[in-house]
Image (spheres, rainbow, N blue to C red):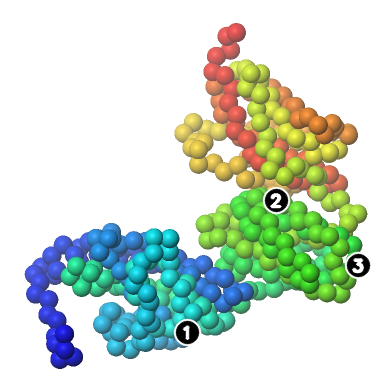
Amino acid sequence: MTPTTVLLYATTGNLGHIPELYANERENHHHSLRFQQRRSKRRLTISWNKSNIDPHLSHYCLAVTSGSQTHPLTLCAAQNILRVHPHPTKRSSSSKEQQHRGIPEGLHCVRQTKLTLHRMKYDTTYNFTLYVVNTRNNVSNRIATDTIRFRKTPELRLRTGHYATASLRKTDGFINFRYRPPGNTSSTFHILPCGGGIVKAKLSGPGILKEKEVVGYASLRIPPLTAGKTYTLRISATPQELVRISAIKVLATQESSKIYPQIPTRSTPREYRSLRTCREVTIGVESAGSAKYCILVRELKNGSSLSSMTTIPDQCGLHRRRRSEYTFEVCEEKESPPKDRALPFTLKKLQPGKAYLLQITAQLKGQSLSYPLLIVRTRRSCLP
């Protein structure tokens, strides 16, 4: 094809079925692009769903601009005003995303549905426009536009013995806590995602790098740190988890401090089904040491979707939890309970054939932690 060649597509009915199908994709274009930021490395990963129309014959072009530059209305317009970045066309079966290490602005055409851009600039607004191209007829269509601001991860000061709280939703799922230990003693970081959910914690600094997945609650125990040096505790959450997590709460304590009950990691309450009756259920939990154990019981109404209920508890504000949400509460003090076997609790005066949601908490010196939630059922029949 020479530079003077013009490609002309003869169509009828506005490309027949094509615009109608693409219109379905355009209806949800505001939700099509997904972003995952790795701010420490100034990277941004953009992903999207496969085209509904001939996905095996489709490839994608992502236009990236910054500042006040508008979204190009068509792929042709984007090609005229933007630098086209070459990407390998060979598709590896193990490669599901493309990497671009040059400047992010420009036009990126790929077969994959994920693209990672490098060298992003902090405090800069980027505009993204996604086009899908059908390789059978070379028809392109704009299906998504979005704009984000690439911000530097905000930082908060963390002082020993003082809670620090931050909204992960306002910081796009990332927050750094700066910590300077007062002495050369071991430290413990207590991490509580408010609302329940899962976050990742990463402590870095001179001579240390430690990571941990936090499911509802976790304590990160660290060997002696150097006094006067600055360490960074980085908390991150995925967009999916941010739906549940309203904030993150962190507390740093020194070696001898015992703030929270020692609930065993990944300890899940269990029901002894052989002891189940129409009026009683018996459960067991691993010991959290000497503490006040409370069981909040809530009857689940008919029609409740048990499979969709999460077992990850909201650890924030357990002492303020509205008792009206629960049918009743049972508490029991345990002094020096055995650590080698489960602590049994029997709940009585339940209704036959009902499902109940149980939240078991352990309280020490006014601070409570919850075990994972547990759903139990009573027997329908009271006959022996």
Query: Can residue 215 be seen in this snapshot?
Result: yes
Amino acid carrying mark 3 in the image: Gly
Identity of the amino acid at label 2?
Tyr
Q: What residue lies at 69% left-to-right and 73% top-to-bottom?
A: 155
Q: Quadrant of the N terminus?
A: bottom left
Q: Nearer the viewer, residue 59 or 249?
A: 59
* Label 2 SS: loop
User: Which of pointers 1 and 2 indicates the residue nearer the eye?
Assistant: 1
Q: CA distance from mark 3 to mark 1?
A: 44 Å
165 horizontally vs 76: left or right: right
The image quarter in which residue 151 lies? bottom right
**Residue found 38% across the figure and 82% down from its top:** 85
Count of all numbered marks drawn on residues in the image: 3
Q: CA distance from mark 3 to mark 2?
A: 26 Å
- 28 or 319: nearer the eye? 28
Q: Position of residue 172 (x, y in %)?
A: 57, 68
Quadrant in which the C terminus appears: top right
Determine the image quadrant of residue 130.
bottom left
Graded by Cα atoms within 10 Å as few (under 14), some (14 to 19) or many (20 or more), the crowding at tag 3 reads few
**In the image, is residue 323 above or below residue 47?**
above
Q: Which residue is mark 3?
A: 183
Residue 48 seen by the camera: no
How many residues crowd around disc 1 within 10 Å: few (fewer than 14), some, or many (20 or more)? Answer: few
The secondary structure type at the circle numbered 3 is: loop
Q: Which residue is mark 1?
A: 103
Identify residue type, mark 1.
Answer: Ile
Against 312, is 1 above or below?
Answer: below
Mark nearer the N terminus (1 vs 2):
1
Which residue is tagged 2?
217
Expressed as whole percent of the image width and height from the top left, the position of residue 289 reads 84, 38
